[in-house]
Amino acid sequence: MNNESKPQSKVAAPHKVPRSKDNDYSPEAAATRRDFVRAQTGVALEHVGRYSFDPGVLPGNIENFTGVAQVPIGIAGPIRINGEHALGDFYVPMATTEGTLVASYNRGMRLLSESGGVKTTVVEAFMQRSPVFKFDDALQAREFGHWVTAHFEGIKAAAETTTRVGKLSHIGQYAIGPLRYLRFNYSTGDAAGQNMVGKATLAACQWIQLNHPDHPNFLLSGNIDTDKKHSQINTLLTRGKRVVAEVVLKDEILKRIMGVTGKDLFQARQISQAGAFMAGSANNGAHSANGITALFIATGQDVANVAESHAAVTYAQLLDNGDYYWSITLTSLIVATYGGGTGLATQRECLEMLGCYGQGKANKFAEICAATVLAGETSLSSAVLHGDWVSSHDQLGRNRP
């Protein structure tokens, strides 16, 4: 066997995506990158390259801007909402590529509106960051926890030096071995606030490290804030906004619009409740992620937050007169009406359509999200029960040449 070393063939280094040192957010820079994609892949991004806004507004939203992904938007509604912040009839923009989705939500909105409207309530709102401090043993970690409680005001002052809007409300504490997990809870105004609370918590941890006699080491995220991941702790303790949407559905209206009765729905609820429990689901309802995602894409939300925001608890009762009380609680709805992607051209228009763009509107938008989710729950659940779930998708949800 020949053991002589053979010359190694050189692998060409991959070409880097082009960037402009002068102005990387310009039509010319985007066109250069589309030309680059064509040279590398043979694909001409003709539709990706068509957009109506100035790329100069994009710093802070994206890097290597090349074009846009155009997602169709449909309008559902009106839906009547009787909330503390959202009050009146709303037409809801929904961005999706799933046939039947807008039609289904539209039907649910009709049902809710004819039943007198949806009552919505924002129960509480917090955004978290969860650092962990490390000690030699559990006793030191426990005593550190007492110190944190005693020095809350100093910690709060340090955190709030970094933000005009964020306010530290309270700090949860959790002990594991020699570790002390701290779950900082903030109000964040009309911003979703993940970056805001990260910066504030870093300042707070640095203050703790400087002022505590042991000067303990810390990790800024111990992962019990579960950022962009579902968790039971967020279902119980709220991340983002906890919002409730509720309605009493008249039995006569249910029969006329959905072809089912309140009694039918309540019996089906027992079955789906057991199924969700058996599966360990984060949601004992039907499909809140559908409506939330469509609204998020249309209005410039961080769509990855659907991972948390879809968690929900349905609670329902069959009333003595045959009417059906139906509520859904979104435990971790993370939304914004200011900052992030909300100011981009099409996203801003969709928020303005709802009267929800800008400061002072986040609770209103959260209520609209919850009401929209409830509309989808009523429609899909009724369709499954009535037997037109598959036929509706067959009619509206199949692409045909």
Image (cartoon, helix red, strand yellow):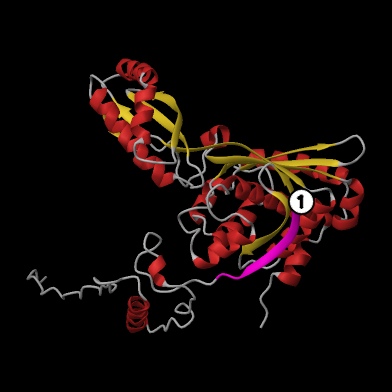
Q: Name the residue at 23% across, 27% down.
A: 210
x and y percentages locating residue 217 in the rendered image: 25, 30
Q: Position of residue 213 (x, y in %)?
A: 23, 19
Residue 85: in sight, yes or no? yes
In the image, is residue 306 part of the stretch drawn in magenta? no
Q: Where is residue 14 drawn, in percent x and y? A: 25, 73
Task: Give the overall secondary structure of the magenta segment.
Answer: strand
State the extent of the magenta-drawn residues as a range: 71-80
Q: Is residue 92 left or right of residue 12?
A: right
Residue 311 placement, left or right of 183: right
> Quarter holding the C terminus?
bottom right
Q: Is residue 102 above or below residue 180?
A: below
Residue depicted at x 35% and y 74%: 26
Residue type at mark 1 is Thr
> Which quadrant does the N terminus fall into?
bottom left
Instruction: Characterize the local packing of mark 1: few (<14), some (14-19) or many (20 or more) Cα atoms within 10 angstroms.
Output: many
| Residue 158 rendering spot, x and y as whole percentages | 33, 31
* Nearest the eye: 247 or 309: 247
Q: Dividing the picture into quarters, in which one does residue 393 lie?
A: bottom right
On the image, numbered disc 1 is attached to which residue?
A: 378
| Up-down relation of residue 178 to residue 10 (above or below) | above
Relative horizontal placement of residue 210, taking residue 229 as reference (left or right): left
Residue found at the far left of this picture: 4
Element under label 1? helix
